[in-house]
Image (cartoon, rainbow, N blue to C red):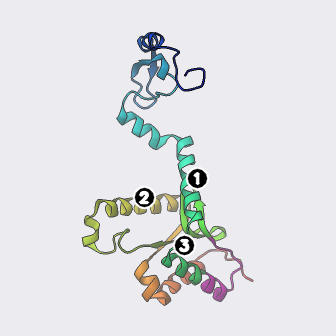
């Protein structure tokens, strides 16, 4: 079985010896020295589940892989109704403003893939679903909605620190109050210090 790549040891006797052989490691999160079976030395990196969770949350290599996987998933799906309305509004407002800019759907900014962005002006646009992003206070009792709201606030803060303007549009406003959404976008375009004109 080991010859075919299906195990680490050739027999139970060798497995018992391997389990008794221990290797000392230092946890990269809390710096605790701990021991692991020699067979797990390469794969076990942290001393506990708590440290493993923290390590996975801060490991830049893993974060990059996860961000790319999320981006691939988002770009392969069909846009939602609010996203389609947002994209149409972007086309119309940019044409009316006579700016020589291009917007990108499902654009990657740092670790996030945003619904749309105008990279040359550093403007991010998000179409937020009413329920899942907590428009009404009663919906915020759902822990998943609360988590989304916390993620949205964190994302807004980090993108602003990176110099991006973040515009969030509620689904109901994109569907029923599109002119007011278009005015917000036009104001953001006009507020850009050096907008490229046609």
Image quarter in which the N terminus is found? top right
Above or below: residue 184 compared with residue 26: below
Quarter location, residue 105 = bottom right
Residue 177 at least partly seen: yes
Please give the name of the residue rendered at 58% of the width and 78% of the height, measured from the top-left corner: 87
Query: In this picture, which residue range is highlighted in magenta?
Result: 91-104
| Of callouts 2 and 3, the N-terminal one | 3
Mark 3 vs mark 1, foreground winner is 3
Viewer-closest of 167 and 192: 167
Say the numbered circle drawn on residue 177: none
Above or below: residue 111 compared with residue 114: above
Work out how far the residue at label 3 is from the one at label 1, CA to CA, in angstroms.
18 Å
Quarter location, residue 131 = bottom left
Task: Tell whether position 80 is magenta.
Answer: no
What is the x, y in percent for residue 12? 44, 14
What is the x, y in percent for residue 142? 28, 63
The residue that mark 1 highlights is 68
Looking at the image, residue 132 sits to the left or right of residue 106; the answer is left
Question: Pointer 2: residues within 10 angstroms few (<14), some, or many (20+)?
Answer: few
- Secondary structure at badge 2 equals helix
| Of callouts 3 and 1, the N-terminal one | 1
Please give the name of the residue rendered at 41% of the width and 11% of the height, measured from the top-left corner: 20
Above or below: residue 165 compared with residue 110: below
Q: Are marks 2 and 1 in contact (CB under 8 Å)?
A: no
Question: Pointer 3: residues within 10 angstroms few (<14), some, or many (20+)?
Answer: some
Please give the name of the residue rendered at 71% of the width and 77% of the height, measured from the top-left corner: 196
The residue that mark 3 highlights is 79
What is the x, y in percent for residue 122? 60, 67
The residue that mark 2 highlights is 154
Residue 111 at least partly seen: no
Image quarter in which the C terminus is found? bottom right
Work out how far the residue at label 2 is from the one at label 1, CA to CA, in angstroms.
19 Å
């Amino acid at each position: 079985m080991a010859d075919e790549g299906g195990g680490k040891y050739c027999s139970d006797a060798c497995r018992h010896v391997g389990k008794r052989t221990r290797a000392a490691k230092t946890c990269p999160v809390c710096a605790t020295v701990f021991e692991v079976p020699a067979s797990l030395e390469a794969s076990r990196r942290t001393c506990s589940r708590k440290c493993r969770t923290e390590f996975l949350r801060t490991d830049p290599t893993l974060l990059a892989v996860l961000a790319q996987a999320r981006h691939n998933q988002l770009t392969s799906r069909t846009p939602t109704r609010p996203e389609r309305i947002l994209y149409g509004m972007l086309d119309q407002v940019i044409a009316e403003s006579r700016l020589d800019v291009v917007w990108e759907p499902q654009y990657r900014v740092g670790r996030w893939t945003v619904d749309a962005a105008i990279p040359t002006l550093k403007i991010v646009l998000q179409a937020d679903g009413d329920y899942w992003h907590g428009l009404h206070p009663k919906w915020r009792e759902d822990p998943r909605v609360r988590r989304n709201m916390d993620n949205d606030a964190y994302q807004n803060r980090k993108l602003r620190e990176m110099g991006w303007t973040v515009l969030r549009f509620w689904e109901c406003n994109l569907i029923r109050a599109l002119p007011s959404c278009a005015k917000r976008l036009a104001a953001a375009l006009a507020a850009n210090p050096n907008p490229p004109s046609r």
